[in-house]
Amino acid sequence: MKKNVVKRLLGLSMAAVLTAGLLGGCGSDGGDGGNDGGSSSGGKGVTLTFGSHQSGLPTSGIVQDLAKEFEEETGIKVDFQISPDAQWRDLIKVKLDSGEAPDIICVDTPIGLASSIHMDQYCIELTDQDWTSRMEDSARSAVSANDKVYGITFPGAKMYFYLYNKQIFEELDLEIPTTYKELKDICQKMLDAGYTPIYEATTNGWHQVLPLFETGGLWLADDPDIYDKLNANEVELESIPHLLTIIEQLDECAKAGYFGADYLSNTMENAKGAMASGEYGMIINEMGFRGEVEADYPDFKATEEMGAFVMPWGDNQVIGVNPASNAYFINKESKYTEEAKQFFEFLARPENLQKRLDGQPELNALCWPEVESKYSEEDQAFIDSLEKANVVQTSVNYIDSQWMDVGKDLEAMYTGAMTPEDVVDTIANRRNEQAELQRDPGWE
């Protein structure tokens, strides 16, 4: 029943977005002007449309707050049009190809991969903007193609851990697991004690995929050149043993009840309340999630009561580092590219970068070195102590582009419609199909 309600709500949301797109075209109002990057209004009275998926914008509303400050300063409004995560990638492709995309577009990076949405084809170049040199090199690279900058991004490198309830661990005398067997053992002890070991949520479509591709350190340990070989099609994806191993482990944990009874209808929007309730032992998330929980549930001191450890799927002990994130781009078909550049310059001001970090509880650092991170000394020391490796989705073509599809594959496995072997074969076949459609030289 819950799942049907969610689907119905998503359908209504999608209809609203499509209606807005059909009514508004590019959505800019307040002046004529062609596609030459100018504006007949001089900025005042212009409305910039900003298209994004749900997880593309902080739930705290800080970007919308900054947009209101921008409007007060310039008279330029920003109209946010939010779409469901699972539908955004396909929707924005359609809008870009039809010339009906918003003025500003939020999508995941990096844009240099062959399997990206190719924002360099659809959006204006920003290399000459003063703020581009202030972003960290890895972040700037993620929004660049052929050494030209096309976007602006803000979060620091992503790292997903298992965040755990310290009180439950102490109560049950549990040790931090470093292998899959140890993870299973502590899950069983939590389950026996009446706790749900792991909060998982498949409804959003992306979260359940993290264990597969955040563990690329396992792949690189076997072959340091594996990413390059996969991109050249010298190695088949299905030959990576860790992929099947981890998918089998996920299936085993789901069947054992370690994700609880409602993981197929759970949402990430409800994850904060779930962890604050003290009923769940662990969740995969970034460290900043603790601050987000504490902001919404101050009685649960999440920054003190939740620890972190590396996801031990497949016996992994290397933390995956994702230098890419959601980024903003300016549609080159927009009538208001100059006004959009103004907005980007406004967001990049040091004082507004600080406001963004302060106003986004789940964020611990920005990819702007001038802004000091919020990591505690203890957290920073822990992160510094870990072996690190770039995640698969930012390094291997045709992985990130099918992320939401892989989420559906895993959901099908959990419901018995697919086997772990089916999931691996489907991911590999889909990757080959995408490469052939792109006429990738490695597949010719």
Image (cartoon, helix red, strand yellow):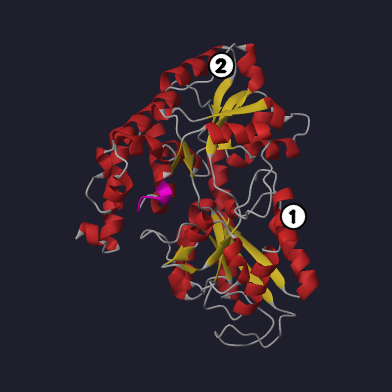
Q: Please state the total of marks drawn on the protein image.
A: 2
Q: Is residue 290 above or below residue 253?
A: below
Q: Nearer the viewer, residue 257 or 4?
A: 257
Let me know if residue 266 appears in the view. Answer: no
Question: Mark 1 and mark 2: span between their CA atoms?
Answer: 40 Å
Please name the amino acid that badge 2 sits on: Met
Counting from the top left corner in percent of width and height, residue 97 is at: 43, 72
Please name the amino acid that badge 1 sits on: Lys
Q: Residues within 10 Å of mark 1 (few under 14, many from 20)?
A: some
Q: Is residue 94 above or below residue 224?
A: below
Q: Report which quarter residue 18 is drawn in.
A: bottom right
Which residue is rendered at x = 58% and y = 82% of the image? Answer: 37
Counting from the top left corner in percent of width and height, residue 291 is at: 70, 38
- Is-magenta flag for residue 56? no
Let me know if residue 50 appears in the view. Answer: yes
Which residue is rendered at x = 54% and y = 27% of the image? Answer: 198
Q: Residues within 10 Å of mark 2 (few under 14, many from 20)?
A: many
- Taking the view exactly as shown, the residue that stands out farthest to the right is 72
Q: Is residue 146 found left or right of 108 in the rendered image?
A: left
Which residue is rendered at x = 56% and y = 74% of the image? Answer: 128
Q: Nearer the viewer, residue 165 or 234?
A: 234
Counting from the top left corner in percent of width and height, residue 349 is at: 71, 64
Q: Which residue is mark 1?
A: 355
Secondary-structure class at tag 2: helix
Which residue is rendered at x = 42% and y = 36% of the image? Answer: 215
Counting from the top left corner in percent of width and height, residue 413 is at: 37, 34
Q: Which residue is mark 2?
A: 190
What's drawn in magenta, residue-wise?
Answer: 393-397
